[in-house]
Amino acid sequence: MSYVNKLLGQDEQILLETRRHAFVLIGQTFKEWIILLVLIAGWIVIRAKMDPSFYWIQIAIGIIVVMVLVSIIFDFVRWNNEAFYVTNRRVIHSSGVMSKKILDSSLSKINDVVMEQSLLGRMFNYGTIRILTASDEVINRVDKIARPVEFKKAMLTAKSEMEPISGAPQVAVASATQLLEELAQLKQKGLVSEEEYNEKRKEILKRM
């Protein structure tokens, strides 16, 4: 079970999971790969000379190569542990390897989602997502996120499915209850007959 699954509430489900695009990882490790290639090339050249005096240089290069590889692995783990989730209730931004940082954005507070994609972004399926509140305040901005179109669509779909449940039915039930109370009062005062009362009551109950 992932760390985020432990944070989910009752009946809360993950609808979509994505990460920053692989280009982000490539950009973070580009210099390290260049250094690694230069070190390997240098080690091959020194090894070809078969000069015993270069023995300690080979060891030093080997140690540096291991350090660079560890750095690349750490960058990968850090990139892999930063993820973005859309659930049926909120948007979750999870980051951190040992220490976790969680940023939640409730779907009910989200007013709009702005997506920006360059030409390369459309070609390689990445983009920038900005989540806005009703006051047009940016509560979360994600650069170079993979599958931005699917992310935005899942977020807006979950929000639209959430709104009717939390809005209209509750208002309808409240209105119907008030009408039933008023109808009962009219019956008690003798302003409507038993037959009219039962007929109107059935009509109101059908609306609930």
Image (spheres, rainbow, N blue to C red):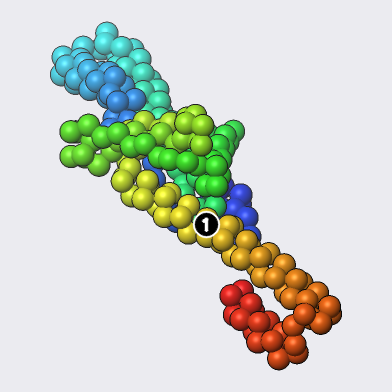
Point 64% across, 79% down: residue: 205
Point 59% across, 53% down: residue: 8
Q: Is residue 75 above or below residue 185?
A: above
Q: Is residue 101 above or below residue 88?
A: above
Q: Position of residue 26 (x, y in %)?
A: 29, 30
Crowd rating for badge 1 (residues with CA inside 10 Å; few <14, some 14–19, many 20+): some
Q: Which residue is mark 1?
A: 162
Asked whether residue 73 appears in the rendered view, the answer is no
Image-quadrant location for residue 11: bottom right
Q: Position of residue 137 (x, y in %)?
A: 49, 29
Query: In the current view of this chain or complex, which residue is farthest to the front?
Result: 191
Point 75% across, 89% down: residue: 194
Image-quadrant location for residue 79: top left
* Amino acid type at image mark 1: Met
Left or right: 29 as drawn, with respect to 88: left
Q: Position of residue 57 (x, y in %)?
A: 31, 12
Q: Is residue 151 above or below residue 45?
A: below
Asked whether residue 125 appears in the rendered view, the answer is yes
